[in-house]
Image (tube, rainbow, N blue to C red):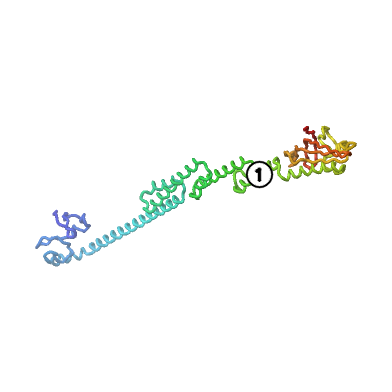
Amino acid sequence: MAIIKCPECNHEISDKAPVCPCCGAPIADHVVTCPECGKVYFSNQTECPQCHHLTGKEVAAQADVHTKPTNVHKNNRIIIMVVVAVALVVCGICYAFYHNAQSDKEQIAYEAAMASQDADVLQNYLAMYPNAPEEHVDSIQSHLEMLKAIDRDWTNAMVSGSKSAIERYLAEHPNSPFKSTAQHMIDSIDWSVASAAGNVESLEAYIESHPDGDYVEEANDAIKNLNTTTVQPEDKLLVAGVFNSFFQSLNARDEEALTSTTSPLMTKFLGKSNATRSDVVTFMHKIYKNGVSTMKWQPMDDYKISKKDIGSQKIEYTVVFSAKQTVTHDDGSTEDLQYRVNAKVSPEGLISEFNMVKILE
């Protein structure tokens, strides 16, 4: 055994080695040593590559014998190179797919974070994608700062508790995540003002401003209750008309007109319970004593009226007012008297109770 240099890669190897461990070139029985210069070269060569010494017929014969194995070696090298190339291509493709998948995943997470109003979502994106594109990171951080500003402004508006501050907040942040809460707060503030005012106008204004408000049902109930219990101008006209007709009938001594203003059965009439229309007519004749030529009753416009719902949306009126009586006697003398009247008017617009007392001067 001798140590030679591989004719292919020039590394020192054993001449008995089947192939060079460095380059894979065949060695044993495939190389010769030039007798002239000592150069090692492949036996299929016809001359020494260094001194060009010819090997002769025997060397030529050996070259013929070993040509086929040399070609096989070359083919093996080509196959190995092709396999390596294919492996590299496959690895490249896999890496490209992986890189694209990661890029797509980051893009989806970025778009979701930018659409979110939750600061935690944005913070999670920054934590999960520390190597995200710089422009994405800048946009996320800017969006995060905006959300923090919204939170600060919302806290300030909440602390102030004023409607104007909350409205200003909504104007500055129309897409705030607190928009719904802010609208409910304004709704509550307006309802508090309307309910405290306690009149139909303020309640109707609330409903107009908040047609879908949290308190619309309560506002409608309150309006209904107020309309039931609050005396409106039309209520006063109704009551005044009833008593004007009653006293005009007394002045005209018109029985039919007089009884048309009273209920068939009155709860009380001048202290008498369950009085009939006949009792009312008897009263009219009684006040026209002998010596009385004319009489003029005039209700004063000092009505104090209250309303009561007695069921099925039927309203009963309780009335207190003053009435003046001027009596003219046959001798031409006159007498003025004043009375305090306490009465009730039924849902049908008839006097259902009537009492009066003389006011002493």
The reply to whether residue 18 is visible in this rendering is no
Residue 353 picture location, percent across and down? 80, 36
Q: Return the x and y of residue 20 as percentages of the image width and height.
A: 20, 56
The quadrant of the rendering that contains the C terminus is top right
Snapshot quadrant of residue 104: bottom left
Tag 1 residue? 200
The mark total stands at 1
Could you classify mark 1 by the number of other residues whose Cα lies within 10 Å: few (under 14), some (14-19), or many (20 or more)?
many
Residue 304 is drawn in which quadrant?
Answer: top right
Left or right of 126? Residue 285 is: right
* Callout 1: SS: helix
Q: Furthest residue to the left? A: 36
- Camera-nearest residue between 10 and 324: 324
Q: 305 or 54: nearer the eye? A: 305
Residue 11 visible, this angle: yes
User: Would you identify the image quadrant in which residue 96 lies?
Assistant: bottom left
x, y (%) of residue 183? 54, 46
- Residue furthest to the right in view is 290
In this rendering, is residue 342 above or below 62?
A: above
* Left or right, residue 92 beside residue 162: left
In terms of depth relative to the viewer, which is nearer, 16 or 100? Answer: 100
The picture places residue 145, in percent across and down from the top left corner, at 42, 47
- In the displayed structure, does residue 330 sit left or right of residue 227? right
Q: Image height check: is 247 above or below 8?
A: above
Q: Amino acid at mark 1?
A: Val
| Front-most of residues 63 and 305 | 305
